[in-house]
Amino acid sequence: MEERFTLSILVSNEAGVLTRVSSLFGRRGYNIDSLSVGETENPTYSRMTILSRGDVATRDQIIKQLQKLVDVKSVALMPPDNTVLRELMLVKVNAELPTRAQIQQIVDVFRAKIVDLSPSSLTIEITGEKSKLDAFIANIVPYGILELCRTGVTAIGRNSNILTGKEDKEI
């Protein structure tokens, strides 16, 4: 049975690492639904969060293949019940004066914020899980979305569930 899964990967912060990781997926015909990468508290490393889908065998094969890459220091499957998942979205919406109060109510309900204002539009920033962002879009569509961009999912373990470079390989 195919299911979605989230991987957190600690990698060397060097040129070409993203290409090597994404190529691994492409060569084997695996799709990346979401990918986010950023430097960690240690500038030597970056952390990748990859959302993909497949059966258990596919997931396990992806993890094994990732662990073989020299630049990969650690790979962790992020269990949904022990992981904080978030995505950032910016939405530019048509906001003529008569509709601004209604849009502000939607922004308030979803705990989003207006980050840019022009005479004819508002740019709104919202973070949360995919379902929250999708619900926000559904509510804002009637006003006219002019532009939308999403970062992709990023994830971190809850409590003492910490990704370090020591689980799978020596740093």
Image: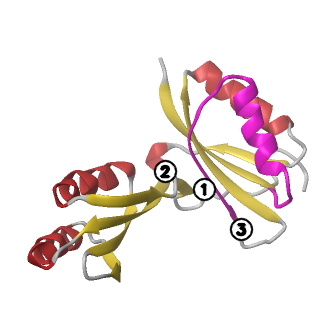
Residue drawn where x is 47% and y is 27% of the image: 3
**Above-or-below relation of 99 to 56:** below
Question: Which SS class for mark 3?
Answer: loop
> How far separated are the C-alphas under marks 2 and 3?
20 Å
Among numbered discs 2 and 3, the one appearing first in the sequence: 3
Q: Badge 2 is on which residue?
A: 82
2 and 1 marks in contact (CB < 8 Å): yes
Residue drawn where x is 46% and y is 44% of the image: 80
Label 1: few (<14), some (14–19) or many (≥20) C-alpha neighbours in 10 Å: few
Percent x, y for residue 134? 31, 50
> How far separated are the C-alphas under marks 2 and 1?
8 Å
Percent x, y for residue 149? 45, 58
Q: Nearer the viewer, residue 140 or 119?
A: 119
Percent x, y for residue 151? 51, 58
Q: Nearer the viewer, residue 101 or 129?
A: 101
Q: Is residue 3 left or right of residue 106?
A: right
Amino acid type at image mark 1: Asn
**Above-or-below relation of 62 to 139:** above
Amino acid type at image mark 3: Thr
Among numbered discs 3 and 1, the one appearing first in the sequence: 3
> How far separated are the C-alphas under marks 3 and 1?
16 Å
Q: Badge 3 is on which residue?
A: 40
Please state which of the two labelled residues, at mark 3 or mark 1, is closer to the viewer.
Answer: 3
**Above-or-below relation of 70 to 48:** above
Residue drawn where x is 59% and y is 60% of the image: 160
Please state which of the two labelled residues, at mark 2 or mark 3, is closer to the viewer.
Answer: 3
Q: Does any portion of residue 61 appear in the rendered image?
A: yes
* Stretch of the chain drawn in magenta: 12-38
Residue drawn where x is 67% and y is 45% of the image: 76
Tell whether position 32 is magenta: yes
2 and 3 marks in contact (CB < 8 Å): no
Q: Which mark is residue 161?
A: 1
